[in-house]
Image (cartoon, helix red, strand yellow):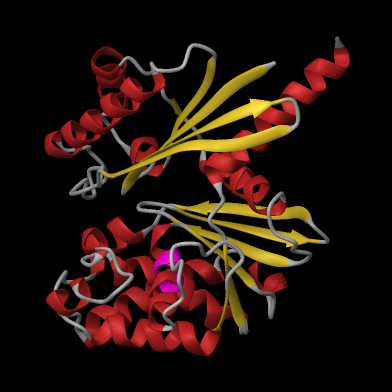
Amino acid sequence: MMHHFAVIDLGSNSARMTIWEIEQEVVKPIKRLKEMVRLSEDMGPDRVLQPAAMDRTLKALQGFKTELNKYADIDLKAVATAAVRQAKNQKEFLKRVKNEAGLIINVIPGTREAEYDFLGVINTLPIQNALIMDTGGASTELILVQNRKLQHLVSIPFGSVNLSERFLNPDVISAPEYFALSTFIHEIFNSIWWLRRAQNLPIIALGGSNRTLAKIERRKEKMADFEAIHGYRMPTKQANAIFKEILGADLATRESIPGLSKFRADIIVGGLMPVISMIRYLDSDRLTFSQFGLREGALYDHLNTRAVTQREH
C-alpha cells in the first residue's frame, strides 16, 4: 500500500514543506518547498506577529495547500515553532491560517522540536556522542547525545532574527554590539547545567544559518553540489575564518558572498553567533552539518507509530 506523508514546518524565518512517498519500507522525498517568510520580523519585546509578516506567511501556506491538494492519500503533520509559540496574537493568526489557507497547524513546544531534531539526526548520521544544535529564527535547540541516546535537551528562545533585531545593526556591526551579543549568549550557556558535559564533543549543526557556513565553504572549494551538505564536516578553524569574513563585511558585501542567501544577509551574524560561541564554549574541534532535522524527525516519528500500529493489528 502506497501512501504519502507531508510535514509543514512553520519557522520564524522560513516556511518549509516536504512530501514523501511511502511504499512498504521504501520512503522517498518527492517534493520540497521553501519560502522565506520571516514571520518573526519586528515582533519586538511585545511579541506580536506583524500584519505584513502574517500576510507573507499566509501566502506561502496557501501555496503549500495547493500542492497538498494534488494528493488523495496524504497524512499531514503541520507544526509551528518559536515565532508562533511566543506570539501574543497566536490564536488570531492560527484562525486566519485555518480560514484562509485551510490548514490546521499545531504549535509545538521547543522540547518537542528538539526531540524531532534528535530523531532526524540519529536516523541519518552515524553519531555516537555529540551536541546537536539547531539555530532557527527565534529559538535554538540543544540536544546532548551520549551513546546514541538523547540525554538532555533544552530550547532557548533566541535565534537569527530576534538576536539580530535586539543587538545588531543590519549593515556594519560595531565592536560594542558584537561584545554585548557575545556576552548575552555566553551567560545563557552558563545557565544550562548539563552543557559542560558536552566538552570537546563534535557539534552537529542544523538550521539555515548554520548550514550557510557549509554552503560558503563548499562554494569556495568549488564542490560540484555545494547544497548537498548532509554529513559534511568542517574543522573549527574554517568555521571561524568564514565567520570572521562575514562579521567584518557590510551588508552589500555579505549579500555578494557566494553560498550566502541574500534573504539571510542581514541576520546571518546573529544567526551564526550561537554556534560560533558554542565552538569556543565546548572547545569543539569540528562541526558536522545535518540537512535533516524537524521535518525528517516527524517522518521517523510517523513511521515508528505506523509500525507499532501495524504490529498491534
Residue 104 visible to an observer of this rendering: no
- Residue at the outermost front position: 224
Residue nearest the observer in this picture, 253 or 188: 253
Residue nearest the observer in this picture, 219 or 168: 219
Q: Which residues are magenta?
A: 210-214
Q: Where's the N terminus, which quadrant?
A: top right
Principal secondary structure, stretch drawn in magenta: helix
Looking at the image, is 297 positioned above or below residue 1? below
Looking at the image, is 224 positioned above or below residue 307? below
Looking at the image, is 93 positioned above or below residue 297? above
Measured from the top left, where is residue 169 in percent x and y?
16, 71
Looking at the image, is 23 positioned above or below residue 161? above
Measured from the top left, where is residue 110 in percent x and y?
52, 43
The structure residue drawn at horizontal position 53% and vertical position 56%, both measured from the top left corner, is 291
Q: Is residue 311 left or right of residue 305?
A: right
The structure residue drawn at horizontal position 71% and vertical position 53%, both measured from the top left corner, is 122
The structure residue drawn at horizontal position 44% and vertical position 68%, both measured from the top left corner, is 226
Q: Where's the C terminus, which quadrant?
A: top right
The structure residue drawn at horizontal position 64% and vertical position 27%, both measured from the top left corner, is 22
Q: Is residue 123 left or right of residue 59?
A: right
Q: How many labels sit on residues?
A: 0
Q: Is residue 179 left or right of residue 223?
A: left
Residue nearest the observer in this picture, 62 or 236: 62
Measured from the top left, where is residue 50 in percent x and y?
16, 38
Whether 11 is among the magenta residues is: no
| Location of residue 283 by image quarter | bottom right
Measured from the top left, where is residue 271 in percent x and y?
36, 65
| Location of residue 24 by image quarter | top right
